[in-house]
Image: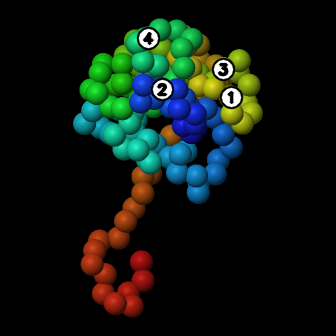
Amino acid sequence: MYHSEYLGGNQYRLRIRDNHPEDLKQWFTFDKRTKTIRAWTMRDYAISNQNGVAYAIGYAAVISKFENLQYQRLRWRAGETNNIQNFGKSCLDVVNRVDKNDQPVTWWTCLKHDNQGWQVDQSGIWYPENPKADGEKF
């Protein structure tokens, strides 16, 4: 998943893309305190519904400026479905169940289909303790 075109109102559309780890627009991180998924390149932006349509089915999933709104809070439903669900109980969904680059992501009724299953890296990123002595490898 990555954020792409600007939609106005401090929001950017989410789409799917083949994995390109060097593209930081594909990196997101879960903020446990606020229960939001934040864009790596714009940490003050969170995955949410399109502005003005909180919990509506079939509307674009976007990243928008974090405003501590209920519809920006998400749940990771690990296990059989691996879906990402908002508090309106809609799931992140790839439109038309098409697995190709640039397909838009929307909020849809949770159906346990593969287009609503997301792979989440739960290992995190490990950084060495600092400072390291000169010449010491990590």
Element under disc 3: helix
Q: Tell me whether circle 3 and circle 1 mark residues in contact (CB < 8 Å).
A: yes
Q: Earlier in the sequence, mark 3 or mark 2?
A: 2
Residue at x 31%, y 81% (from the top left corner): 132
Which quadrant would the N terminus be assigned to in this image?
top right
**CA–CA distance between discs 1 and 2?**
20 Å
Q: Earlier in the sequence, mark 4 or mark 3?
A: 4
Residue at x 30%, y 19% (from the top left corner): 70
Which residue is identified by label 1?
A: 103
Element under disc 4: loop
User: Which residue is at the front of the view, 130 or 68?
Assistant: 68
Nearer the observer: mark 4 or 2; the answer is 2
Nearer the observer: mark 4 or 3; the answer is 4
Please name the amino acid that badge 2 sits on. Answer: Gly
From the viewer's perspective, is residue 50 above or below residue 65? above
Q: Earlier in the sequence, mark 3 or mark 1?
A: 3
| Scheme of colours in the image | rainbow
**CA–CA distance between discs 4 and 2?**
14 Å
**CA–CA distance between discs 3 and 1?**
7 Å
